[in-house]
Image: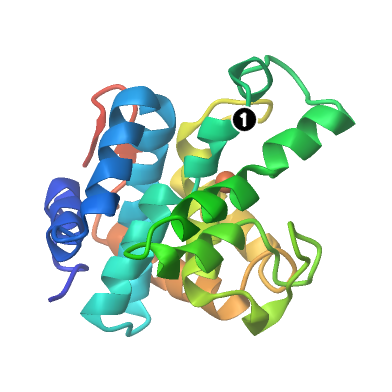
Amino acid sequence: MSFTNEKSYEKILNSILRLWDRQEDFNFYIALMSRQFAFEFNHSRRVAYYAVMLGDYVGCNSRDVAKIGAVALLHDIGKMNVPSTILYKQGIYNQAERATVERHSVYGSQMLLCSKQLSELALPVLSHHERWDGTGYPEQLRGQEIPLAARITHIAEAFDVMTTIQNYQSLKSPEEALDELKRFAGSQFDRTLVNAFINLESSFLESGSLPVYHTATGSFR
Ligand SMILES: [Fe+2]
């Protein structure tokens, strides 16, 4: 299976879901997120799109690509355990609030460990905010100590946040977001993966078919 030739986001998402369709617990969590946690789930679907394409591009086999997609879809599921008054607070978090929000990766991994079917996703979900230089959380893992699926999800998530989510920073164009990833390659992000992501996205940019999510239409181009 090649994901990079599939330009349609829905086809890619469906490919992940098909590969995991005998995983009842996976379907349960997907249904839970999509119904109860729509904003995060839409973000996660976009992250899964970029993560799957990057995993495929760097040569992962189809099972590992599906696992990367599943990690990306469920990476923020632990946010369901964070009080919504904190999670959706307008403005900057104070120290205690930030610590509470950052617990989401631990909560997510604990949820996944409850399921025999999904326990293999627990470690990458736990590590999706670790940074290449060891300054991330929760365990300050560094370099290749961080699971590949977590390193890929971290890049995919950063790209999506920069290009689609309006928070305290202004939205960036895809080109600006790629520049930003490059700036933090080797510190925040795995440099090899960032270079691969830039090559992948640049090939779409050059051909004028960059698959970027458009908030106005709610779909990828
Ligand atoms: Fe997260």
- Of the 4 image quadrants, the one containing the C terminus is top left
Residue 29 appears in view: yes
- Total marks shown come to 1
- Is residue 210 depicted above or below 192 in this figure? above
The residue positioned 34% from the left and 27% from the top of the image is 215
The residue positioned 85% from the left and 30% from the top of the image is 96
Left/right placement of residue 86 relative to residue 55 reads right
Figure quadrant of residue 6: bottom left
| Residue 142 drawn at (x, y percent) | 73, 76
Residue 209 appears in view: no
| SS for dot 1 | loop
The residue positioned 78% from the left and 72% from the top of the image is 133
Figure quadrant of residue 40: top left
| Residue 123 drawn at (x, y percent) | 54, 67
Q: Mark 1 Cα within 10 Å, few/some/many (few <14, many 20+)?
A: some
User: Between 95 and 159, which is closer to the camera in this rendering?
Assistant: 95
User: Between 160 and 45, which is closer to the camera in this rendering?
Assistant: 45
- Is residue 185 depicted above or below 49 in this figure? below
Left/right placement of residue 199 relative to residue 130 reads left
The residue positioned 69% from the left and 35% from the top of the image is 101
